C-alpha cells in the first residue's frame, strides 16, 4: 500500500502528464491497490481461521481484519510523511495546484465546478504541513474503515465456506 502511495505522489509530480492521464493513472493505481488489499486481508483472515481451528465468529474475524488494516494504515502514514518530506511539502503542493489549474481549465464551461476547484486550491495553499502523527492517524483511520468493510465481507464469506465444509 505504501508503494502505491509513493507511486501516486510521483505521478502527481510528473511534469509530462496532463490532467486526464494523471486521473487515469490514479484510478489504475487505486484499483490495483484495492485488489491487492482485499486479497491480502481475505487471505490473512482465512489463514488465522485455519490456525485457530475454525473457532472464530464473524465479529472476531472482522476485528482481526480491522487490526491488520490499522497497521497497514500506520505504515502508509509513515511512508506518506517521509516521501512528502523528501520531495518537499511546497513542491508537492505547487504541483498539486498545477493539476487543479489544469482541471479548472478543462472544465471551464461548467462555472460552478471551476469555482469549487478555485476554493479548494485556496484552502490547500493555506494548509500547514501535517505532522507525522497526524498523517499516521489519518491513514490508520481511513484503513480501519476499509478494514471494517473488507473484513466483514471476508468474514461472512469465510463463515459460509466453513459451514459448507462442515456439512460435507
Image (cartoon, helix red, strand yellow):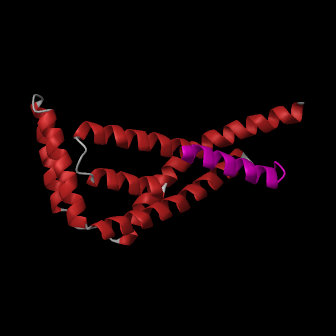
Counting from the top left corner in percent of width and height, residue 38 is at 58, 44
Residue that appears at 33% across and 71% down: 131
Q: Closer to the camera, 167 or 86?
A: 86
Magenta: main secondary structure equals helix
Q: Tell whether 76 sits left or right of 64.
A: left
- In what quadrant of the picture does the C terminus appear? top right
Nearest to the observer: residue 125 or residue 28:
28
Q: Is 131 one of the magenta-colored residues?
A: no
| Residue 59 placement, left or right of 149 | right
Q: Which residues are magenta?
A: 36-56
Q: As drawn, which residue projects farthest toward the right?
A: 168
Q: Eyeballing the image, is 68 above or below 151?
A: below
In this view, which residue lies farthest toward the top?
109
Who's the residue at 74% across and 54% down the image?
Answer: 48
For the point 72% across and 40% down, the residue is: 158
Given the current orientation, which residue lies at the most extreme front position? 16
Query: In the drawing, does residue 57 fall left or right of residue 149?
Result: right
Residue, x 20% and y 65% (percent of image)? Answer: 90
Q: Position of residue 96 (x, y in %)?
A: 22, 53
Q: Is residue 117 left or right of residue 9?
A: left
Amino acid at each position: 500500500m505504501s508503494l502505491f502511495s509513493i507511486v501516486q505522489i510521483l505521478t502527481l509530480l510528473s511534469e509530462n502528464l496532463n490532467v486526464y492521464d494523471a486521473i487515469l493513472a490514479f484510478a489504475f493505481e487505486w484499483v490495483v491497490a484495492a485488489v491487492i488489499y482485499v486479497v491480502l486481508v481475505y487471505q490473512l483472515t482465512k489463514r488465522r481461521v485455519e490456525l485457530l481451528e475454525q473457532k472464530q465468529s464473524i465479529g472476531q474475524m472482522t476485528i482481526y481484519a480491522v487490526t491488520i488494516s490499522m497497521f497497514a494504515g500506520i505504515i502508509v502514514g509513515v511512508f506518506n510523511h517521509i516521501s512528502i518530506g523528501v520531495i518537499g511539502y511546497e513542491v508537492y503542493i505547487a504541483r498539486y495546484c498545477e493539476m487543479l489549474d489544469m482541471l479548472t481549465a478543462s472544465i471551464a464551461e461548467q462555472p460552478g465546478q471551476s469555482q469549487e476547484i478555485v476554493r479548494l486550491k485556496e484552502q490547500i495553499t493555506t494548509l500547514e504541513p501535517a505532522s507525522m502523527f497526524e498523517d499516521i492517524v489519518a491513514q490508520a483511520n481511513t484503513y480501519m474503515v476499509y478494514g471494517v468493510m473488507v473484513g466483514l465481507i471476508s468474514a461472512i464469506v469465510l463463515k459460509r465456506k466453513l459451514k459448507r465444509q462442515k456439512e460435507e
